[in-house]
Structures are given as C-alpha cells and as structure tokens.
Image (tube, rainbow, N blue to C red):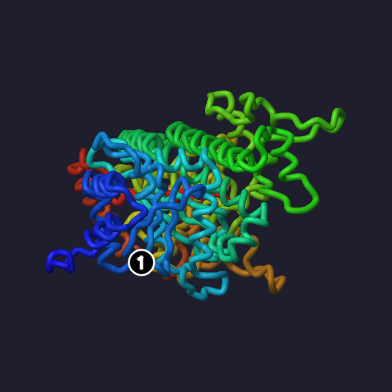
C-alpha cells in the first residue's frame, strides 16, 4: 500500500472492493464513478472513511431484497445492490447515487445517540439501523419518494432531505421534518427492538412507514412552503410599514395557514401511498378493504392513521372512501386539488383533542403553525409599526377566522424580537404584545406573552392571563385594593388597544397613587426618549425587518 493510499481510507475501500472475487471490473468502475462524479457525496464518504465508519463496500448477495442497500455498524460495511452496479456506457447510475446517499445518511445516523423519556442517553444500535432500513426497503413508493427528496432542486441548493436523527423521548410527535437541516427525526422507541419483533409488530412497522412517507413529502414541499413564507413576510412587512390606523394581519396569515394545510394534506396522502405500497409487497392486489382491515383487525393492528382515509359503512358493511376522496384503481391517492382539500378537512382541521401535537401535546395544527406565524407578525410589527408618540400599536387579528386561541398559541410558544420593551417588572418573560380580536363585535382587546423562553425560565410555554380586578383577594374572601402592577397591566392593554375612555379613567385613578406621582418626572423624560426613538425609526423606515425567526419544524403526532 502506498503512502497516498494510507492517507485516503476511502480509496483503500474502493480498491479492496475492486479486488473482491465476486466483483466484476465494470461494477468496481461504476462504484468509483458514482462517488467521483458527485463532489459532495465523495466528501461525505471520505469523512465517514476517515472516522472508520465506512471501511468496506460489498455487493448484495444474489436474490437479496435490498433496493436501498444495507449498512453494518460493527463491520463499517456498506452493501450495494448488485443490479445497480451494472452498465458499461460510463454514465452515472442515478439509482446507485441515490443508494449511496441513503447509506451515507444511515451510516451517520448509526453513530448518533438518542434519549428516552427519562432523559437517559443511549447509542443508536444496529437493530435500530436494521429496522429503519427494513422500513425503507419494504415500500417501493417510499423508496421512490425518498430518492426524489435526495436530489437538489437547483445548483448551489441543498437536497430537501439530508439526514436521519432520533426524536427526543419527551417530544409529542410521531416524526418531524426540519426544513433548515433537512433531517427526518424518527421515534427511537419504535426502532429500539429486535428486527424480528419489529417485523411482527404491524403497528410499529406500518406507522413508521406512514410517518416517513409523510415527513419526506414535507421535504418535497419545502421549496413551495419557503416561497409562501417569503410572500407572508413581505405582506406583513407592508402592513407594518403602512402606518395604520389599522394593523390587520388576518389576510396574509390566513393565506400562510392555507399553505400549511396544503402541505400537511399532501404529506398525509404520501403517507397513505407509502403504507399501501408496503402492504402490497406481502399482499399483491391489496386495496381499500385490506388497508381498512389492517387497522381494524383484532390482533396485530397496523397504523390507525389509515382511518383518516377509509371507513366501514354502517348499513352495507362495505369499506368506503372518506368524504370527497377519489382513489385510483390500485388504491393509491393522487394529489389532486379535490383530494388535497378533502384530506385537509379530515386531518389539518381536527380538534386539539384529536390532534395532540405541540409542546404539551394539546394543540391542533392551526395553533401549532399559528404560534410561528404570530411570532413572525410580532417580530415584524414591533420593529416597524410605530405611532406618533413612539409607542407600538396593537396587532389586529380575526382569531375565529384563523382558528387561533391565545391559550394554545402561548402554550406552543410565542417569541418576541431582541430589544422588546418589558413591563415594569423588568423581567424578559414579562414582555407583552397587545392585540385586538376583530372577529368579535365589538373587537376584544387581549395580549400575547413571550413564552418561547429558555429552559427553566418562568412561564415557559404557559398561558399567562391578566387577572380581572374583582379576582383580587378572592382567596381570602376579602375585597383588596388593586395592586399597582395590576393597574399598570390593564392600563397598558387599554392604551395599546386604543380605548381612550378607559385609559383616561385609569389615568385619573393611577395619578392618586403616591408612587406614581413620584414617577411622573421620570415618565416625562421617558416619553421624550420614545418620541426621539420614533423620529429615528422614521429615518430607518425603508430598512428591512431583522431577526425573523426560522421556519417551524414540520411535526405529526
């Protein structure tokens, strides 16, 4: 072995592959060509080889059903389907390139760790890798879908899907897709079992297949979703810069929520198709009745997600499609506008009690995605919307039309931009943003709290209502005077809601407090500073908003 070979473990592995008695020269050339023609793929394999995580390539045995190959953690060995190594025209096999990318992702995943519900950290085992590979190899539709997601949409852009990882044991989700990292996060408890047990557990196996089909589709939808996010930010930026008097963000937020509905519905359809494809490998010709039976049988049930698509008619006892769904003859679902709309109603529009996603597992999709959308509105509004005195006007939203609830938004987590002005307590978690629910007649004033705060801070992912004055002293049964903090809270809401009558009444009452009288001089100085800040803001009027938070992780229960 030359000194150059010793410094290049990947080259050593490729030469060893070419010297195997069961490998033909054309096969060795195909493997080398696939790695040489893709700089990013070769660099990733060079890193794995340098870490000792890939030391050998081997062809799959004859008759092996491994369309995506196999990774052996202990042997640091990548098995490649023999049929993908054929061909003599010198062209790069797209199937082989896709398989090598999948194996690179699996090899990286195999050397990570996962945490259980008790926060104990454990290494990913070979059993977990084998079970994940079995799910990928078991559904041709899932394989085709994943291979599409491994291709970059344009030069200099990353592929939508770029890795696997484990969900934290405390996350209330069946799987997630992160558009920033391109990673699919999967439930380790589903994978952490002997392969024989995994194969015999239809619930675990089919649910994982469905979840992967769902999450990979999020990756395929990511470019369109990113475009809608850009359009959403542009629209709310224009509203924030308009100068009022109304700062109604309902229309752009409704459009953005509709993009989320479409994204989730497409992902659900992909999950159905992946699961049907898996079932048809063992039961050729399986269709709607067999899919329903998979979820409805007494023992060894499959994923219950199937029942979002089909049901048994109570009169005829026949298995029928869900409302407005049009299946193909083979039982698959095409992503037509009608099917997407039907699945959105059946899935995205479910109640919080049925959906159970989010930080506490008590949210529906409108409020899960709504927390992100409202956060973006708050970020942009607080940076650009200013009144003449330098104060920030209230946000206006039709909460009913958007199906948003303050409680769920705050429990999912709302974030405010750096530099947001806190309440008099001075604590960052006390930041509030006034809003008007214009879906009520008359509009109802409310406030959003900063609840997406660091671990261990007060009120993290909690709803924070402002207590009504009559609630003071309720525990003792004795009427108590309202605290200064309570008065300030209510006064702030009235001021930012534009309720002049209530504000002036409260101003008169507040002026009688000795502590407030002592603060008047400071308040006048503070007002002058705010006016100056407003003038400075006008000079920066055309500057783009900053600190826009990243897109949310796509999550399913």
Q: Nearer the viewer, residue 544 or 261?
A: 261
Res 223 → quadrant: top left
- Pinpoint residue 86: horizontal percent, then vertical percent: 35, 40
In percent of width and height, residue 446 lies at 52, 49
Residue 361 visible: yes
Tell me: 81 left or right of 537. Answer: right
**Residue 495 appears in the figure:** no
Q: Is residue 527 above or below residue 330?
A: below
Q: Is residue 118 above or below residue 533?
A: below
Extreme residue in the left direction: 3
Q: Indicate the quadrant where residue 188 lies.
A: bottom right
Front-lying residue, 117 or 520: 117
In the depicted view, which residue is nearer to us: 491 or 297? 297
Instruction: Find residue 420 and report its horizontal and vertical position in percent.
Output: 34, 57
Q: Percent from the top left, x then y, of residue 357?
A: 58, 52
Label 1 crowd (10 A; few <14 / some 14-19 / many >=20): few
Instruction: Report the residue at 39% width, 34% height from top.
Output: 224
Residue hosting label 1:
519
Q: Secondary structure at mark 1?
A: helix
Q: Picture quarter containing residue 514?
A: bottom left
Q: Is residue 275 above or below residue 421?
A: above
Give 328 or 514, whichever is nearer the viewer.
328
11 left or right of 235? Answer: left
* Residue lying at 39% horizontally and 51% vertically, measured from the top left: 80
């Amino acid at each position: 072995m030359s000194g150059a070979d010793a410094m290049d473990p990947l080259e050593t592995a490729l030469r060893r592959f070419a010297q195997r008695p069961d490998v033909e020269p054309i096969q060795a050339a195909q493997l080398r060509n696939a790695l040489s023609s893709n700089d990013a793929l070769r660099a990733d394999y060079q890193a794995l080889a340098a870490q000792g995580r890939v030391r050998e390539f081997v062809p799959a045995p004859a008759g092996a059903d491994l369309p995506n190959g196999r990774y052996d953690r202990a042997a640091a060995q990548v098995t490649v389907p023999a049929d993908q190594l054929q061909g003599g025209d010198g062209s790069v096999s797209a199937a082989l390139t896709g398989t090598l990318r999948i194996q690179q992702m699996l090899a990286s995943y195999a050397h990570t760790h996962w945490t259980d519900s008790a926060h104990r950290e454990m290494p990913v085992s070979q059993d977990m890798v084998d079970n994940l590979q079995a799910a990928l190899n078991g559904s041709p539709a899932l394989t085709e879908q994943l291979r599409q997601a491994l291709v970059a949409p344009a030069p200099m852009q990353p592929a939508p899907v770029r890795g696997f990882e484990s969900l934290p044991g405390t996350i209330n989700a069946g799987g997630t897709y992160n558009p920033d990292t391109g990673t699919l996060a999967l439930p380790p408890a589903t994978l952490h079992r002997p392969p024989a047990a995994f194969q015999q557990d239809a619930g675990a196996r089919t649910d994982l297949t469905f979840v992967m089909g769902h999450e990979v589709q999020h990756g395929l939808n990511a470019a369109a979703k990113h475009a809608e996010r850009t359009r959403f930010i542009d629209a709310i930026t224009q509203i924030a810069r308009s100068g009022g008097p109304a700062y109604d963000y309902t229309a752009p937020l409704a459009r953005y929520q509709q993009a989320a509905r479409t994204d989730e519905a497409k992902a659900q359809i992909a999950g159905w198709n992946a699961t049907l494809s898996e079932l048809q490998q063992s039961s050729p010709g399986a269709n709607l009745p067999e899919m329903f039976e998979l979820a409805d049988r007494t023992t060894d049930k499959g994923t219950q997600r199937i029942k979002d698509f089909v049901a048994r008619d109570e009169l005829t006892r026949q298995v029928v499609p869900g409302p407005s769904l049009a299946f193909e003859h083979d039982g698959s679902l095409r992503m037509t506008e009608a099917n997407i709309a039907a699945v959105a109603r059946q899935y995205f529009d479910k109640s919080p009690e049925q959906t159970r996603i989010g930080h506490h597992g008590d949210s529906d999709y409108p409020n899960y995605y709504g927390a992100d959308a409202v956060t973006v509105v708050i970020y942009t509004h607080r940076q650009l919307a200013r009144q003449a005195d330098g104060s920030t006007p209230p946000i206006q939203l039709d909460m009913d039309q958007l199906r948003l609830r303050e409680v769920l938004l705050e429990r999912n987590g709302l974030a405010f931009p750096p530099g947001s002005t806190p309440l008099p307590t001075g604590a960052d978690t006390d930041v509030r943003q006034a809003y008007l629910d214009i879906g009520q007649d008359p509009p109802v004033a409310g406030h959003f709290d900063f609840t997406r705060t660091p671990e261990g801070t007060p009120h993290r992912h909690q709803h924070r209502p402002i207590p009504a004055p009559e609630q003071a002293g309720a525990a003792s049964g004795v009427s108590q005077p309202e605290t200064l903090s309570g008065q300030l809270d209510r006064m702030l809401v009235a001021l930012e809601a534009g309720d002049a009558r209530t504000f002036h009444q409260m101003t008169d009452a507040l002026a009688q407090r000795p502590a407030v009288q002592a603060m008047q001089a400071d308040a006048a100085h503070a007002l002058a500073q705010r006016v100056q800040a407003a003038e400075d803001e006008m000079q920066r009027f055309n500057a783009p908003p900053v600190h826009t938070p990243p897109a949310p992780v796509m999550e399913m229960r």
